[in-house]
Structure formats: C-alpha cells, structure tokens
Image (cartoon, rainbow, N blue to C red):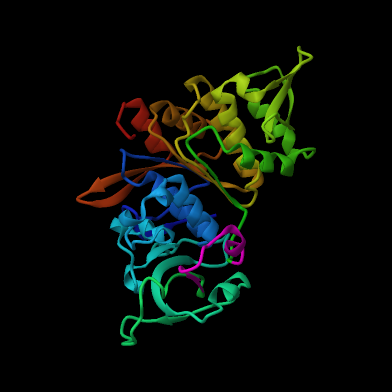
Amino acid sequence: MIHSIEIRNYRNLKELKINAFSRVNLVTGKNNVGKTALLEGIAIYALKGSVSILNEIINDRGENLLPEENTVLENNRLVYASLFNRRIPSYNSKGALYVGVNNTDGSAFRGLSGSSVSLRFVKCLQPDNAGENFMNGLRPTEVIEDDDNRDITLPDNLGMEISYNNKTHVIPLNIEVNEKEAKNFPGSERCSFVKPNCGDNKKNETFWERIALTDKEAYLIDALRIIEPKIEKITFIGNKDGGRMAVAKLNDEKAILPLKALGEGINRILSIILALLNSENGYLLIDEFENGLHHSVQRKLWDLIFKLSEKLDVQVFVTTHSLDVISGFEYILNNRENNAAGKLIRLENKKGLIRETEFTAKDLEVATDSNIEIR
C-alpha cells in the first residue's frame, strides 16, 4: 500500500503532500483542484513512470490532438510538456515532475521496490542508431546538463528522462514512441484506472478473460445483481463490427441480451468491479465514481468495494463531486468492524497551492450529520 505521497510540478499540483492514506480513499474538492491529477500521479508512481501510462494520460485529455504550433515545444511528439506544472518543461532536477513517498511523518512503506518517480526533459547527444538501441531497451543517449557548454540543436537532440528508484531511462524524442518501444520500460499491471465514462470495452474484455472460469467470476455476477438481480451469467461475444461485446443471460429468459441494453449503471459497475478484480495486490483508481450510478445502488457498491479490496489486498482511490457518494461511503465505513479502512481527502486551492484536509470515519459522521460541506 501507498501510505503517503508527495507530488511536485505535475499539472496544477505545484507541491502536494498527503501524509496518510487508508485502504479505500475518497477524494473530493471543487473543479480544477487536482482530483484527477492526483489519481494520474498515483498511476505514474505505481506504474514506475512507464511510457504507456504517460501516453494514456495525454491521449485521454486530448493533448495529443493539439496542432503543432500550439504545443510547448512546437512538435506534436513532445506533448509530454503538458504534464508539467503550468506546462513548462524542466531541464533540471529541481523543476522535475516528481511523485514519491512522503516519509516526513515516519510512516512505513511497502508495495513497491522504489520510492519515487521523476520526469524531466534533457538535452542529449544521440548516436545514429538511437532509435534501434531504444527499441532494444538500451540507453541511447548521452545527457548534456545545463552547465555543459556544448552546442546542442533542439528539438533534434531532445529526450525525456524517466527515473525510477535511481534507474534512469531516456526516450529520444526525435523518434516515434510507440507501444512496442514503450514496453521496454519498467511497468506494472497492478494498477487499474477506471475513467469517468462507462468503460473501455477492449479493456473490459481483457479483464474478463483473466477472471473467466475462476472464483472471481462469482464476485462480478454478485456486483451486477445489485442492479439486475436476474443476471445468471455474462460473457463477451463477437459482434457484426468485428469486435466483442458483453452479453448477459437472465434466469427467466432464453435469449441473451447485450449488457448495454440493461442500462448505463450496470456497465459502470462492470468496469469498476472488473478493474478491481484485476488489481489484486495493487491499486484501483476510479475517477468520478457516481457517473451512471443511481444513489440507491451506491451503498451496496461501496460495501462490495470495501470487502473485495480487503480480500484481494487492493488499495482504492476514488474521486467524486456527489454528496450521495460521500453519504454512502460514510455509512458503509462507519458500519464496518474496521472503520479505519477508509478516509475522505478534500483538496482545496489556497492562494494558488493545492492543500488537503483529511476526514476520518468519525469526522465524516459528524460532517454528514451536521450538513457540513465537504465536496
């Protein structure tokens, strides 16, 4: 588990420290205070700064679609600059994008072999075979620090340095960074990120294949029955477009139905629980929990998330704007034997800096009973 975190120079998080996470963490706050950025920072940390997660974050925000003249470095492959605070890339360690464990409180740390991830742009000398070496997983460049007076042509001699636990890799940015190349960098499959929409069908299909015909399949069916008690089984089958889609068999019908025909909420639960079941001994991130979910199902879903996260040793981070989500979270938390298993963290913008306030189970009970605004 991640017990604490420090994020510097990432998007609008110039410097954010959170001293104590729980197993299940609910993050609230007004728009543009960095709730999603916090989840992204945790993903970058958990996945060791892998190129794949950086590309996914950029693509999800549409920053890969900016015309070249609007990108900070005037080259569409260099949109990594958008990850940095105020979109200003750093060439030195002081201004590097940093995500690491905040150990100032002496808290223990386990779960990852390293303690920090950092990213920065670097000026570098690249040999003629830099692209070939990069695809072979070798360090392809010689980094030129700021105090080096050698004449370097930019952007032709520009790279992104990714450091994890004192292990450093440099991506030469004059070549296309594709998925094949990205796999040469360290990563992990223990972190699943559920976005605000109803889910990535391809990702859900992959997650399903990993749990089909295992004990975990029953947990998924139980979750889907929160909305449709008649569900007997589900699977993925081919459709006329050449892809695959989730279908369900109800116990009083002969025909199978597309799961989408049963509503947005049940597909949201499918995405959340499939991701949770595929994050054993790792991390689950859920952005905007409430999307597609009626308030009447949220308590039952929270109850299942608490139970499964404990059973599978998954640490959960969730964002919300919804009072119903907070109310359901507080109810389940305070009706569990271990009410230290959850915490609410509220982010606020204080004079341009994002700061956090933590609410324990007891704090949440008082706040909800007194109608104190904590969204």
Residue at x 34%, y 54% (from the top left corner): 11
Taking the image as shown, residue 344 lies to the left or right of residue 276, namely left
**Outermost residue, left side:** 351
Quadrant of residue 26 within the rendered picture: top left
Judging depth in this view, the residue of 106 and 201 nearest the camera is: 201
Question: As displayed, is residue 89 above or below residue 366?
Answer: below
How far across and how far down the image is residue 340, in percent?
Answer: 49, 43
Quadrant of residue 31 within the rendered picture: top left
How far across and how far down the image is residue 240, in percent?
Answer: 70, 29
Taking the image as shown, residue 58 lies to the left or right of residue 275, namely left
Which quadrant of the figure contains the C terminus? top left
How many marks are shown on the rendered structure? 0
Question: As displayed, is residue 126 above or below residue 366?
Answer: below
Question: As displayed, is residue 113 above or below residue 361?
Answer: below
Judging depth in this view, the residue of 234 and 15 nearest the camera is: 234
Q: Is residue 2 visible?
A: no
- Give the magenta range: 169-184
How far across and how far down the image is residue 177, in percent?
Answer: 52, 62
Which quadrant of the figure contains the N terminus? bottom right
How far across and how far down the image is residue 118, in percent?
Answer: 43, 67
